[in-house]
Amino acid sequence: MADFNLVVLYVADAQASSAFYQMLLGCPVAQSSPKFVVLPLGNGTMLGLWQRDAVVPLSSEAGSSEISWTAPDAEAVRATCEAWTTRGVRIAQPPTAMPFGHTFVALDPDGHRLRVLAPAAV
């Protein structure tokens, strides 16, 4: 099983939301791009702010949320996807190589996204 490490909120403007959370939580930016910002929440857990118009796969609802776990590599992402599929979990995005790493997205019963990600080498 992969380790839990990231909560992602879909926002209208990633940079404006980043400024708000930095002010609110008093934490620095750990990673930033124009449409995605990560801030540390403590104990290895991070808050991701992903600009809604850049989310992949597309989110059809405002306020949708995503929970993410890290995996050691692309093979672990694939194996976790297969295990979850076997358990009847709905898959929204099959294992896919993306700019930030190898990932897949599953859905919980309410449609919340469950992402497993092997981050790209920095």
Image (cartoon, grey):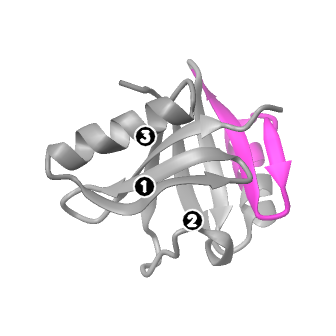
Q: Position of residue 56 (x, y in %)?
A: 57, 67
Q: Is residue 113 magenta?
A: no
Measured from the top left, where is residue 106 in percent x and y?
34, 55
Q: Looking at the picture, tell me which residue is in the foreground, 36 or 47.
A: 36
- Residue 70 seen in the current view: no
Which comes sooner in the sequence, label 1 or label 3? 3
* Residue picked out by circle 3: 78
- Quadrant where the C terminus sits is top right
Q: Which residue is mark 2?
A: 10
Q: Which mark is residue 105?
A: 1
> 25 and 61: which one is in front?
61
Range covered by the magenta-colored residues: 20-42
Q: Is residue 108 above or below residue 77?
A: below
For badge 2, the amino acid type reads Tyr
Where residue 17 appears, x then y in whole percent? 71, 61
Contact (Cβ within 8 Å) of mark 1 with mark 3: no
Q: Residue furthest bottom?
A: 60
- Circle nearer the viewer, 1 or 2: 1
Q: Residues within 10 Å of mark 2 (few under 14, many from 20)?
A: many
Dividing the picture into quadrants, the one containing residue 24 is: top right
Task: Work out how far the residue at label 1 is from the one at label 3, CA to CA, in angstroms.
Answer: 11 Å
Q: Amino acid at mark 3?
A: Arg
Count of numbered marks: 3
Disc 3 element: helix
